[in-house]
Amino acid sequence: GIAMHSPARDWTHANGVSFDAAHGQYIISLYWYEQLLFVSAETGAIEATLGGAASSWSIPPGGGFGPQHSPVATPDGLWLFDNGFGHGGPSRLLRYSLDDEAGVAEVEWERGFEGAPDFTIMEGDILPMDNGYVAASFGMLGAAWVLDADGQLVWEIEAVAPVVLARGDDR
């Protein structure tokens, strides 16, 4: 049979969508493609992509992601949970700046999971908060964090496996 979590059964694994009101776009995460689509809310057209074979922005070495979850656009940049196993770990929390003029996506902020194992193949989430803090869950690693604006850990929980921590909200 076909494995439940495989491209043959779930060819895109669209696992995250958020709305970027500043640009009038939906941002859709395609797990198996290691790519984000930026889709016009008005026309439904794909206006840009990040990652994958035809990225609209180049990504400098070490700045790539994949697979990923939870894209979120804020005035500070584009936030993303990088599962990490596509590049050997660790799972990371990332914030990109997207320079349309130069055509470059730069990692401005990152925080990797510290521990062993250091990546999760399933789940994972990031939520930037209005006070500058960042909340994150690390899926199959059974951990969740809250980081301050400087990336310092202010709260954490680690559950005993097998536990999958994820998040749901109204965004």
Image (cartoon, rainbow, N blue to C red):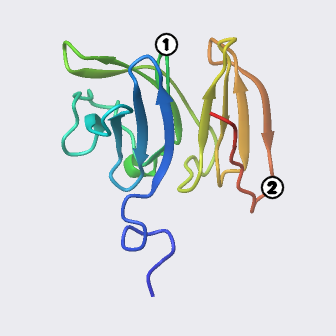
- Image location of residue 151, percent across then percent down: 62, 18
Q: Quadrant of the N terminus?
A: bottom left
Left/right placement of residue 155 relative to residue 25 reads: right
The residue where tag 1 is placed is 76
Residue placed most toward the observer, 114 or 2: 2
Residue placed most toward the observer, 160 or 30: 30
Q: Residue furthest front?
A: 42
Residue placed most toward the observer, 29 or 138: 29
Q: Which secondary structure lies at badge 1?
A: loop
Q: CA distance from mark 2 to mark 1?
A: 34 Å
Query: Is residue 160 positioned above or below 108 on the image?
Result: below
Q: Quadrant of the C terminus?
A: top right
Instruction: Please name the residue shown 19% across and 14% down the image.
Output: 102
Instruction: Please name the residue shown 43% across and 44% down the image.
Output: 29
Q: Amino acid at mark 1?
A: Asp
Q: Say whether disc 2 or disc 1 marks the residue closer to the N-terminus.
A: 1
The residue where tag 2 is placed is 160
